[in-house]
Amino acid sequence: MNHLLSIVLFLPLAGALLLLLVPKENENAIRWIANIVALAGFVVSIPLWFWYNPQNPDFQFVERAPWIPTIGAEYFLGVDGFSTLLILLTTMMGSIAVLSSWTAITERLKEYYIFLLVLQTGMLGAFMALDFLLFFLFWEVMLVPMYFLIGIWGSANRLYSAIKFFLYTLVGSVVMLLGILAVYFYYHGVTGTYTFDITQFHKANLPYNLQWWVFLAFFLGFAIKVPMFPFHTWLPDAHTDAPTAGSVILAAVLLKMGTYGFIRFSLPILPEASKAFVPMVVGLSIVGIVYGALVALAQRDWKRLVAYSSVSHMAMVMLGMFALNPVGITGSIVQQLNHGISTGALFLIVGIVYERRHTREISEYGGLSKVMPVYAAVFLIMTMSSIGLPTLNGFIGELLILQGVFVASMWWAAVAASGVVLGATYMLYLYQRTMFGRVENPKNERLLDLDHREFATFAPLIVLAVWMGLYPAPFLERIRTSVEHVMARVNPAYAQALADCGGRALPGPAAAATPPGQPVSASSFLIATPCGPEPPSPKAPARQVAPQANPGAPR
């Protein structure tokens, strides 16, 4: 347990170094080593689920060592419930992405798998780092392998898409670095200590003027990564031209870097500025929900449709987050996991037919359920998951977001609900055009159904979609302390109510219910927190009162 995070972090990098020693002509060995390393990375991360203590509000599995002492930078790793779930999502989707590439990639295999494994290390490091400089290092490391994955193994416009992705993200990263340095030097001016320790920044009270500018710096870096409207234009191009594994990783994990940044850094470090910028963020999120859904509805390219659906879904995540109440933030985190599962599966689905037909035009398909019944069944499950059908994972996330947003503003919730309806429209329209009807194109008559390896990439995603839809309690319990930590910073009244209850806030959505007779002001974006039930005292059992025959008689 003392070095579990380091093992999970550097195992993919060790696999990449091992692949350097394998001759590039030995393609089977390269494939097997990459798949074994990726699967091992997922296996060694599984103990995080069992060993993480949801009742402990502190960061856990902490590792700390000097890195650059002269400037106060440390090798400082640790996780809470939110980052634990994102790490498990990353290792699982990484192993699925590597497995999905077995027959899809036939050129430069060695370099391809090395870049995939290095990308895995960069993503894991960003979720684990509790030192701001270390976080920024891993944040930048992710750019390089994804740039090459798109630029070398992508489709027709891969160079344009790779450069656009790189420049967009780089601009946001540079501005974000200026914000990090502003916090770093202010903290030194107040305490006399140079440090990049994120846990110390969470306790600092920055002046509002500084928060305002730093929030904008962080916002640009994180909003591009989400991506929020109008910073989203790199995403459809990158998704369309990336190889299948690149699209899966991009949708399932990389987009979560932006939302993770808002929850880990912007909200707790800059609480006053976060509340001040709620109207701007909510406005952009509402536009993104409707715009992304409408543009997805107009797409002719299968992959671009799924890419624009991500713009709409991630805007919904941001809307729930900036409702700034426990239910909204909880729904935002849950929906991030849901989006990673469902949209990652949808890109796998597109990649399978593209590998067989080498076209993504929706009009080229039709009636595939007759020749690929297992494929059509998997596609239907993940379509319903993306739509938010009850009993599947998408429903609980959308429900919590709408519940949290409704408390802040009924009109915000109404627009968000319209995005849910539009999402069902474009996904069902896509399914109807590709799976139903007659097989009119002769090229589709002999398409092969899913083989065992391809089905293995979907199996864990289907299991998670059903599990989270039917029994989300274990996931909600793990993120409860993360949500409480954020709420304690952006809403001091919530923290005081929690203290008055002796820490007995009801877990999950019930923690945000408003007590009867106490109206909630939408302008304050606060939700009162009721106390949980008082635990019974073992020394003073409750006195049993016998029922009276005449209830109206005096006692």
Image (cartoon, rainbow, N blue to C red):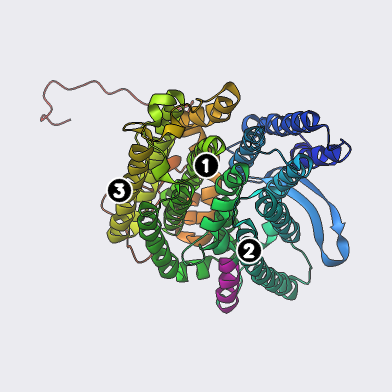
Assign the N terminus to one quadrant of the image.
top right
Query: Which residue does the numbered mark 2 point to in the structure image?
Result: 169
Query: Identity of the amino acid at label 3?
Result: Val
Query: Which residue does the numbered mark 3 point to in the structure image?
Result: 421
Mark 1 secondary-structure assignment: helix
Q: In the displayed structure, would residue 357 be above or below residue 547? A: below
Q: Looking at the picture, how far across and down is residue 405, in whole percent?
A: 36, 55
**Badge 3, how many Cα within 10 Å: few under 14, some, many 20+?**
few
Cα distance between the residues tagged 1 and 2 = 22 Å
Q: Residue furthest front?
A: 442
Marks 1 and 2 in Cβ contact (< 8 Å): no
Viewer-nearest residue: 107 or 319 = 107
Q: In this orientation, does residue 342 appear?
A: yes
Query: Which residue does the numbered mark 1 point to in the structure image?
Result: 347
The dot on residue 327 is none
- Of tags 1 and 2, the one toward the viewer is 1
Where residue 85 sits, quadrant-wise, is: top right
Where residue 217 sits, quadrant-wise, is: bottom right
Query: Identity of the amino acid at label 1?
Result: Phe
- The boundaries of the magenta stretch are 209-220
Q: Looking at the picture, how far across and down is residue 43, in whole percent?
A: 69, 29
**Badge 1, how many Cα within 10 Å: few under 14, some, many 20+?**
many
